[in-house]
Image (cartoon, helix red, strand yellow):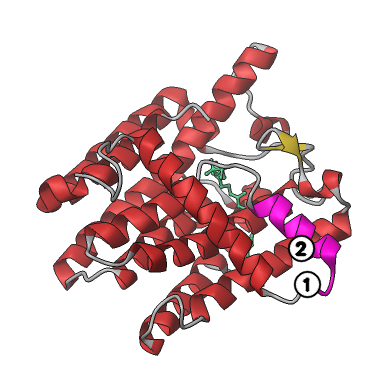
Amino acid sequence: VTLPGRERSDAAAILADIRRDVDEAILEAIGDMPARSLRLADAMRYAATSGGKRFRAALTVTVTQMLGGTRSMALRAAAAIECVHAQSLVHDDLPCMDNDDLRRGRPTAHRQFDEATALLAGDALLALAFDILADPRTHHHAGVRAELVLRLARSVGQDGLAGGQMMDLYPSEIISSAELIACLAGKTGSLIRYAVEAGILLGHADDQCNAGLLSFAQDLGLLFQLQDDLLDAVGDERVVGKALGKDAAKNRKNAVSVLGAEGAAQEAQRLLASCAKALEPFGDRAACLLELARFAARRTL
Ligand code: GRG
């Protein structure tokens, strides 16, 4: 299985390939808008093109191409998704939430600029994402564009990112592992799921394909967050010598604090197996997608 212009289907190659193109698409979209404030546009560029693995973008492009859709359309949707992701990170880093100083190895947006600029850059990135999706350059059918917009709205709202983040900030509402799963699904899983859904909308999937890919996306979103929590716990062990991640320090719950490190690792393996099973009907066509799922389970950053 190959992506155009490349022979390898390993995750590093897929992500590197996407990174360059998606950064270009984001910069183009920011540049397309009249810049009322150069400072705001600077902060948007800083937040949205400052590195990052581009995992969500890679999912959209890979699914779209696997289903016979066009790479250029997929890249615009991928850019929109990475703008939303950047917004969520900028807001998550603010003093009223995680109060972090560093993101992707650089000062967080509010440290580099100031809180008001970071807040507004996040708002403008979210608006830009919907703008990109609603633009006819993303898809010639208005119905497809409307569906892309509607599903993104649902992925980021009270039943998506915002709702999941709220449960994360108010962990007393999380008492069972089922509720923990709901939180993870909202906070991280909903945008990963949307990245796959966008690929389905831009490609040509029948209903059966659709169901298999959605189940893959659901499991992958949880897997990605479980690995994030495991990495947090390991990182903290290195720093303070015990399994207390930054979430624990802030009295927040995560997969490791609720399931234990071993339980979380076992659950991650179960989810990876389930991802692989959901892709079986696609055979070799899903090699890149499977490689991205394996990457999610073994990544170290
Ligand atoms: C979008 C309306 C709206 C609200 C946002 C602040 C907030 C509400 C949500 C924050 C959710 C959050 C920070 C989830 C963590 C997700 C996560 C695992 C981030 C790290 O993703 P990576 O590893 O990061 O893909 P890179 O830097 O590689 O892109």
Determine which quarter of the picture holds residue 211: bottom left
Q: Nearer the viewer, residue 146 or 266?
A: 146
What is the secondary structure assignment of the residue under circle 2?
A: helix
Would residue 184 be visible to someone looking at this image?
no
Residue 19 image offset from top left, x and y in percent: 49, 46
Q: Is residue 148 left or right of residue 242?
A: left
Q: Farthest residue in the top direction?
A: 241
Whether 38 is among the magenta residues is: yes
Would the CB of label 2 be found within 8 Å of ligand 1?
no
Q: Residue at x 63, y 47 (%)?
A: 171
Relative vertical location of residue 152 with respect to residue 182 in this rendering, above or below: below
Q: Which residue was labeled with disc 1?
A: 35
Q: Which residue was labeled with disc 2?
A: 41
Relative vertical location of residue 77 with respect to residue 138 in this rendering, above or below: above
Whether 246 is among the magenta residues is: no
Determine which quarter of the picture holds residue 131: bottom right
Dot 1 amino acid type: Ala
Residue 252 image offset from top left, x and y in percent: 65, 40
Task: Give the Cα separation between the discs numbered 2 and 1.
Answer: 7 Å
- At label 2, counting other C-alpha atoms closer than 10 Å, the crowd grade (few under 14, some 14-19, many 20 or more) is many
- At label 1, counting other C-alpha atoms closer than 10 Å, the crowd grade (few under 14, some 14-19, many 20 or more) is few
Q: Are marks 2 and 1 in contact (CB under 8 Å)?
A: yes
What is the secondary structure assignment of the residue under circle 1?
A: loop
Residue 111 image offset from top left, x and y in percent: 85, 44
| Quarter of the rendering occupied by the N terminus | top left
Q: Nearer the viewer, residue 42 or 277?
A: 42
Write the start and end of the magenta stretch as one range: 35-48
